Image (cartoon, rainbow, N blue to C red):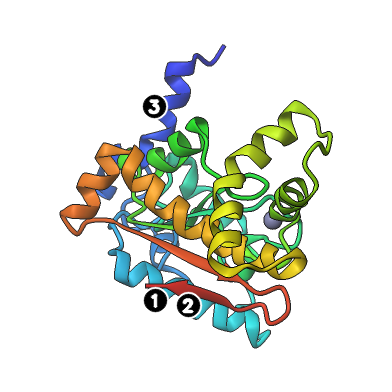
Amino acid sequence: MISRRDVLKGFAAGTAAFALSNLPGLSGSTAWASGHGGHGEAKVVSPQEAIARLKKGNQRYVSMNRLPDPGVGPEVRMPLTKGQWPYATIFSCSDSRVPSELIFDEGLGRLFIVRVAGNMLAPALLGSIEYASIHSTSRLIMVMGHESCGAVGAAVHVAEHPGTKETPGINDIINRLMPAVLKAKKETGLNGKELVEAAAKENVRMTVKQIADESEPLREMQNKGELKIVGGYYSLTTAKVDIWV
Ligand SMILES: [Zn+2]
C-alpha cells in the first residue's frame, strides 16, 4: 500500500531529481530536449520566461496554429515517471470551457493546474499551489478567471437575491467569492451579467494578493524575485488570455 508519505515524496520528486545524470536511463535521452524547449527538463524556468511561454502557447491556440504534438505521447510520458518539472501553476475554474493545456497549447508535465469552481482560495487549494513552487519547479503562479463564470454568477445571484438556497458545498464557494462580489458592486455599481464580469476580475485581483498574504514561503520567494504571482483573464469569445503583469 502506498502511504501518504510516499505520495508526498513522489510529489517532491521534481525537486529531488534535478541532477539528470543521476536518473537511471535518462542520461543523454533526447526526449528531454525534444519539442519546443524540452519536456520534463531539469532546469527551473524564470517567471518571465514562463509568462513568455504561456503567451506564445495561447497565441498558437487563438490562431488555431497549434503544435502538431504538444507532447502528450509515451516519449514524453515515460521520462515523467521519474518526476515532474512544471514551469507554471495555473489556478483556474473547473468550468469545462477553460482547459489550460489546450488554451496554452501545452503537453504533459509543463503546467501544474489547480482547478475549483470560481477559482477562489481555500486552505487545500493554497496547499496545492504551494506544493508546485515549494516542492517542485513552478516559479510562476497565475490566477486565471474567465468570462461568464457560473460560480461567480451564482455568488452575484445570491448577493442580489438574499435567501437563495444552495447546498453547503456550493455555499462555501459562494461565501468565499462574496467579498469580491461586494467590492466590485461597491466600486462599479454594476448589476447582473456586467457585475459578474467585474466580480470575476476582482476575485482574481483579490486572490493574487491573498496567496501572497497567506503563504509566507511564497511571499518570501516573491520578495526575492524568484517567483511571480500574477492574475489573468480568459475570454471565451476570443480564446485570448490577458496576463496582468
Ligand atoms: Zn468559472
Specify which label sits upstream in the sequence, 3 or 2.
Answer: 3
Q: Which residue is mark 3?
A: 9
Mark 3 or mark 2, whichever is nearer to me: 2
- Three-letter code for the amino acid on which mark 1 is drawn: Ala
Residue 173 appears at what percent x and percent y? Answer: 66, 39
Ligand 1 sits in which quadrant? Answer: bottom right
Compare residues 23 and 126 and report the one nearer the observer: 126
Q: Residue at x 56, y 66 (%)?
A: 106
Distance between the Cα atoms at labels 3 and 2?
32 Å
Q: Residues within 10 Å of mark 2 (few under 14, many from 20)?
A: some
Q: Which mark is residue 159?
A: none
Specify which label sits upstream in the sequence, 3 or 1.
Answer: 3
Q: Residue at x 58, y 40 (%)?
A: 176
Q: Secondary structure at mark 1?
A: helix
- Three-letter code for the amino acid on which mark 2 is drawn: Lys
Q: Which residue is mark 2?
A: 55
Circles 3 and 1: CB atoms closer than 8 Å: no
Residue at far right of view: 165
Q: Residue at x 53, y 60 (%)?
A: 202
Q: Relative to 65, does residue 236 appear above or below in the rendering?
A: above
Mark 3 or mark 1, whichever is nearer to me: 1
Q: Residue at x 39, y 46 (%)?
A: 211
Is 41 situated left or right of 7 in this image?
Answer: left
The quarter of the image holding the C terminus is bottom left
Is 57 situated left or right of 162 in this image?
Answer: left
Distance between the Cα atoms at labels 2 and 1?
5 Å
Q: Which mark is residue 52?
A: 1
Residue 23 shows up from this direction: no
Q: Residues within 10 Å of mark 3 (few under 14, many from 20)?
A: some
Distance between the Cα atoms at labels 3 and 1?
30 Å
- Three-letter code for the amino acid on which mark 3 is drawn: Lys
Q: Relative to 171, does residue 180 appear above or below in the rendering?
A: below
